[in-house]
Image (cartoon, rainbow, N blue to C red):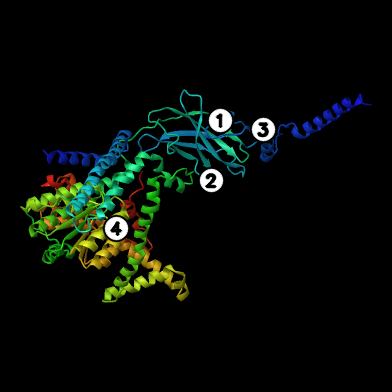
């Protein structure tokens, strides 16, 4: 009996092994017969797992009835770019109406290379066109010949590949962006008007500029500080020198510093940006020289404070509360700190003149300051103060451009009203004429 | 020479980049990218000048024993001490950032400590003051001193009530009228200002390119 035990154990093991093997192995796949549904075909398909960015030669699918690969692949150069994009269009596979057909995968390879790369996917409800080159991981090189293959992707993961197609075009950069024609026309028109008024001003044509209270109050504010024997605080904004508002502010600073030098009033100019600081210092120094008082220039009057926004505010507020300046100028670009600065200045009892092109900060300045230069008035201030013909000409040029815009808006209102009353569609052509396309 | 060379650079560069805007070709883009990479490098060097200015100002104050001169030490000591610690313990530079990004934080150096526990709370405190200043500024602005100020006050009340649930309880029209004020009169005014700003910017840039505006040159401008 004991001799039979190993044989019995062996038989038991063999039986268990056979049962386990029977349970693990799926039944052999049967070829789908004609007329079977695609769903049934897909259930029986044996596929290898597809990983993105791998060669699609590993992808296989049994093409059943109705599973036709995409075709008609056309590759064209994407317009108005730097030669870094191609447009791939194709005809959809026949299963676009099937729930199992989920989309398309676009593969690409450089001519002469073996490896295909998955460069993008499209959902079934998207257009059958794809812009290759937008993904920074798969850039398109200008002048390089590519080959494309498009696969129809099914819910089960099956991909039915199209034939390999050599791109009919290679990517190339364009010399002119056709989407910017209207911008160019606008620029030429604006430039022409500005230059026209430059020359008109130089010829001595009298130009009227409407008075701006904030600019006219600058002299008064400087005089007030002089009479009180207190300093003037000038904040040239918190932005960089590349900001036009900062440049405009530096120009006004030059004029203010000249007056300050003439009157012998102390001036304080804290800066947030080191480049703005160096320019502001040179501007103030030059203004003192022009006023004939270079010896009165104090190097410590123009200084760098910090680049941190709220640390800068804390520093300037501290100056306001300690030094009690009689006049505060806030001219340039400001953000969330505008109200903190202006409200502290208001509490310190100073006369305040502000100016910014930041639309969101204007209400705060208007509320807390005595005078506010709104938007473009900041840019116009230097021309008002200097009264140089070319500067005045540029303002008249701006006004002429605004006149054109106002005329177009008025025309739009009239056409719109006509369309509402008469039921016509006359506004369309004007909209097409003035609407700027979204360009890269 | 001190004036003409910068003016020539600006004129050539300005015209070049106006043209560049209309050329999407790769060479044009390369030129633009090259320039934009240069600009921050120049800015980094200028920071040295800024630190020099701050040090000079406060050392003068200490030397002259000017009013509140003791506080100048509070500027100068951290100004040099914190970068010193950052240099000798570079791993402490990114400590705070790593924590916020969900990364492992192994050390907390002096730089990290000062930034997270001193600078950030102080800045947050300054920012939070804005809430109180808005209240006081609103109180001053919304006084019905004239007809226009009364219109402003009414508009502000409607918009504010339109933004909060109690407004809808008081009257269903509050949110609608508030939205209308924001979408039409308010947006119209904002666009008008933006339009003027756009033209003003263009005109200023043209004045700089053509050398009419020279104050950006500092002392060399005149």
* Rendered image: mark on residue A125: 2
Q: Mark 2 or mark 3, which is nearer the start of the sequence? A: 3
Residue A212 seen in the current view:
yes
Of A222 and A140, nearer the camera is A222
Front of the two marks 4 and 1: 4
Q: Mark 1 or mark 2, which is nearer the start of the sequence? A: 1
Give the residue drawn at x 37%, y 64%: B183
Which chain is mark 3 on?
A: A
Residue A86 percent location from the top left of the image: 42, 35
Element type at marker 3? Answer: loop
* Rendered image: mark on residue A314: 4
CA–CA distance in space, label 3 to label 1: 15 Å
Element type at marker 4? Answer: helix
Discs 4 and 1 lie in a common subunit = yes
Q: Looking at the image, do the residues carrying marks 3 and 2 touch, with CB atoms under 8 Å apart?
A: no
What residue did someone put label 3 on? A46
Which chain is mark 1 on?
A: A
Q: Which quadrant would residue A386 be assigned to in this image? A: bottom left
Residue B95 percent location from the top left of the image: 43, 45
Element type at marker 2? Answer: loop
| Left or right of B92 in this view: A238 | left
Q: Mark 1 or mark 4, which is nearer the start of the sequence? A: 1
Residue A376 percent location from the top left of the image: 22, 57
CA–CA distance in space, label 3 to label 2: 27 Å
Discs 3 and 4 lie in a common subunit = yes
**Quadrant placement of the C terminus of chain A:** top left
Badge 1: residue crowd in 10 Å (few <14, some 14–19, many ≥20): some
Discs 3 and 2 lie in a common subunit = yes
* Rendered image: mark on residue A56: 1
Element type at marker 1? Answer: helix
**Quadrant placement of the N terminus of chain A:** top right
Residue found farthest to the right:
A1
């Amino acid at each position: 009996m004991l001799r039979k035990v190993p044989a019995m154990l062996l038989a038991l093991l063999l039986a268990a092994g056979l049962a386990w093997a029977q349970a693990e192995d799926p039944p052999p796949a049967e070829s789908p017969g004609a007329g079977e549904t695609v769903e049934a075909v897909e259930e029986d398909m044996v596929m290898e797992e597809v990983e993105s960015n791998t060669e699609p030669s590993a992808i296989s699918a049994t093409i059943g009835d109705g599973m036709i690969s995409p075709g008609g692949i056309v590759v064209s150069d994407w317009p108005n770019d730097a030669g870094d994009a191609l447009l791939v269009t194709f005809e959809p596979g026949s299963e676009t109406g099937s729930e199992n057909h989920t989309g398309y995968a676009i593969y690409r390879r450089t001519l002469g290379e073996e490896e295909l790369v998955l460069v993008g996917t499209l959902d079934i409800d998207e257009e059958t066109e794809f812009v290759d080159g937008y993904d920074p991981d798969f850039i398109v090189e200008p002048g390089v010949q590519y080959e494309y293959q498009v696969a129809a992707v099914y819910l089960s993961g099956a991909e039915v590949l199209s034939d390999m197609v050599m791109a009919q075009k290679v990517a190339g950069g364009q010399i002119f962006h056709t989407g910017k024609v209207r911008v160019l026309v606008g620029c030429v028109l604006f430039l022409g008007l500005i230059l026209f008024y430059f020359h008109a001003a130089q010829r001595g044509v009298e130009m009227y500029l409407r008075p701006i209270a904030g600019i006219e109050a600058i002299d008064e504010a400087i005089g007030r500080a002089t009479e009180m024997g207190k300093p003037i605080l000038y904040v040239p904004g918190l932005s960089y020198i590349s900001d036009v508002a900062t440049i405009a502010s530096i120009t006004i600073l030059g004029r203010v510093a000249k007056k300050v030098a003439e009157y012998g009033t102390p001036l304080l100019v804290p800066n947030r940006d080191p480049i703005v600081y160096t320019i502001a210092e040179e501007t103030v120094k030059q203004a003192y020289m022009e006023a004939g008082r270079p010896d009165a220039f104090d190097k410590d009057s123009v200084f760098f404070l910090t680049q941190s926004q709220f640390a800068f505010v804390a520093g300037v507020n501290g100056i306001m509360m300690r030094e009690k300046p009689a006049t505060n100028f806030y001219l340039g670009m400001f953000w969330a700190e505008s109200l903190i600065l202006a409200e502290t200045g208001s509490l310190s009892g100073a006369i305040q003149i502000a100016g910014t092109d930041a639309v969101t900060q204007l209400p705060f300045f208007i509320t807390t300051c005595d005078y506010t230069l709104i938007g473009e008035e900041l840019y116009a201030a230097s021309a008002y103060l200097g009264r140089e013909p070319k500067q005045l000409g540029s303002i008249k040029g701006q006004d002429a451009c605004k006149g054109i815009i106002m005329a177009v808006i008025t025309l739009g209102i009239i056409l719109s009203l006509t369309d509402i009353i008469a039921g016509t569609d006359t506004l369309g052509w004007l909209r097409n004429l003035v609407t700027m396309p979204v360009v890269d | 020479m001190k004036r003409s060379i910068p003016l020539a650079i600006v004129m050539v560069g300005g015209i070049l980049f106006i043209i560049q805007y209309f050329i999407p070709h790769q060479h044009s883009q390369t030129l633009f990218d090259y320039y934009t990479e240069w600009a921050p490098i120049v800015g980094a060097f200028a920071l040295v000048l800024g630190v020099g200015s701050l040090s000079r100002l406060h050392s003068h104050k200490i030397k002259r024993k000017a009013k509140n001169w003791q506080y100048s030490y509070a500027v100068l000591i951290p100004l040099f001490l914190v970068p010193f610690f950052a240099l000798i313990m570079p791993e402490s530079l990114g400590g705070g950032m790593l924590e916020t990004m969900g990364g492992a934080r192994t050390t907390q150096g002096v730089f990290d400590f000062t930034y997270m526990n001193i600078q950030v709370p102080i800045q947050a405190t300054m920012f939070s003051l804005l809430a109180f200043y808005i209240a006081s500024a609103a109180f001053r602005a919304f006084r019905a001193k004239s007809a226009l100020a009364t219109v402003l006050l009414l508009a502000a009340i409607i918009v504010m009530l339109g933004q909060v649930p109690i407004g809808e309880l008081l009257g269903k029209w509050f949110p609608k009228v508030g939205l209308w004020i924001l979408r039409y009169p308010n947006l119209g005014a904002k666009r008008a200002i933006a339009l003027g700003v756009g033209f003003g910017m263009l005109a200023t840039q043209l004045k700089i390119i053509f050398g009419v505006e020279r104050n950006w040159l500092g002392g060399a401008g005149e």
